[in-house]
Amino acid sequence: MIDYHFDWSVIARNWDKLIDALLLGLWLAVISLAIGCIIGILTAYARLSGKKWLSVPVWAYVEFIRCTPLLLLIFFLYFGLPEFDITFLDKTESFVLSLSLYAGAYMSEVFRAGLSSIPKQYVEAAKAIGLRPWQRQAYVVLPVMFRITLPAVSNNLISLFKDTSLAAAIAVPELTFIARQINANTFRVMEVWLTASALYLATAYLIAILLRQVERRYASIR
Amino acid sequence: MTEPALLQATNVRKHFGEIEVLKGIDLTVKQGQVVSLIGASGSGKTTFLRCVNLLEEHDGGEILLDGDPIGYRMVGSTRKRLSETKISAQRARIGMVFQQFNLFPHLTAGQNVMLGLTKVQGKSAAEAKEIAEHWLGRVGLAERRDHYPYQLSGGQQQRVAIARAVAMQPRLLLFDEVTSALDPELVAEVLGVMQALAESGMTMLLVSHEMLFVREVSHHVLFLDQGRVAQEGRPSEVFDNPESERLRSFLGRFHGIFSR
């Protein structure tokens, strides 16, 4: 370790590759969050519907995802689905499906709490001006809920971004995978992993700052 | 009694579980009238108001708005609950102002007024904006149209809520203790707006503890006690000749106001 001589030229040579990999990870996180939000809203409504045949499957889904490791889900979908002749997903799509299902379970809980916390008075005011049930949800309940849950959604985006490193396990060329590849080819262990860590850290921190700005902009509630 | 009633309630009953909160309320509001409900808390006045707007459903008697039953239609001799869409359409004909203002927190004052105009009445954004500006002007808040509710005082919020309700041009406007949540110094500005509305001929049904105001603007006053109309009449009759001990003691609590 003491004899280790840093040679950063390996990073310079592979910089474009690393950045591309970083952006891929970011993209995977964003798209999974988007799909996860849709799953989350639908399942949150199902959970709150008061209908057992809707709420029980959702409960099972949420608990299953929350209580099993994400890596297992990734392996299961990537290696398991082809066993059932479901082969139209490539490794990246398969990973997005895994991460979306994972995000969906967490967003489901976030949105369920958000929907439950919307004061009844807003819905009554929406009723009083004659909005129909779906309009009350679309124009009053959901916009208010999104503002309430924004901090939780932000935290989830940062978590999901870090979780994209698990895609390396099924050879999706995101940052961790590329870093490992460069490492294997050059044996510049410290340079590569320090750089990868710094990139994760800087990006996650940047997301946090950006989302804080968004939160401030939408802070019209209380 | 030549002009037909705009709102006609007959023997309206309502239970919450075992408790009967409305034990047969009869009430008539004619076009252009201001009718007030007074009474101690728990007497059923707010519940009745909420039944008129279908925020609660009455389980006996009938409430007719322009002759149409509210919340259901008759199929033979049985009641059939209206669809949510039809109920929403009925609610759009009635405006309501709440004790806690209930402005939509994610919308500006102007957007609060515009929402029903565009989404319920299908007006264009430009037209809705014009109407919103008109009514915000009428309640004295034209320059606050881009403010969010949290940037407004309670009195200002309530005036926006009134503008939101009136802008829809409802047949009837309901006021549910709209000054009870306000600081005393903000009550006057809201009552002022309500008085102007009453004078402009708006039909209003209100629940209020502002006895002086009720006495001044109402055409008809009903004193509710334990879910029944205990006494009703012109304001002077009710306030000056309370027939029951309960009304006397209820009014006695506001004694200071009347001896001024």
Image (cartoon, coloured by chain):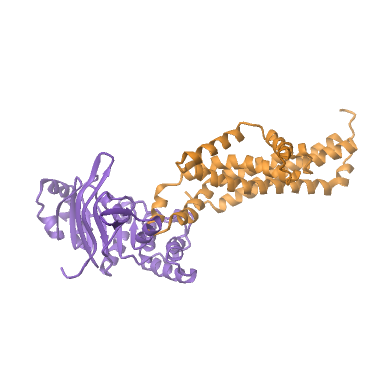
Chain colours: A orange, B purple
Based on the displayed image, in which of its 4 quarters is residue B80 positioned?
bottom left
Give coordinates of residue A214: x percent, y percent.
Answer: 59, 52
Q: How many marks?
A: 0
- Work out whether residue A188 or residue A176 is closer to the camera in this orientation and state it: A176
Give coordinates of residue A189: x percent, y percent.
Answer: 85, 34
Give coordinates of residue B19: x percent, y percent.
Answer: 24, 40
Note whether residue B116 is visible: yes
- Work out whether residue B36 or residue B85 is closer to the camera in this orientation and state it: B85
- Hey, which residue is sitting farthest top in the picture? A2
Based on the displayed image, in which of its 4 quarters is residue A4 positioned?
top right
- Quadrant assignment for the C terminus of chain B: bottom left
Q: Residue at x 14, y 49 (%)?
A: B247
Give coordinates of residue A136: x percent, y percent.
Answer: 45, 54
Q: Residue at x 32, y 50 (%)?
A: B56
Q: Residue at x 43, y 68 (%)?
A: B133
Left or right: A123 with respect to A174? left
- Quadrant assignment for the N terminus of chain B: bottom left
- Work out whether residue A42 or residue B27 is closer to the camera in this orientation and state it: A42
Note whether residue B177 is visible: no
Image: A77 above or below B26: above
Left or right: B12 with respect to A92? left
- Work out whether residue A68 or residue B206 is closer to the camera in this orientation and state it: A68
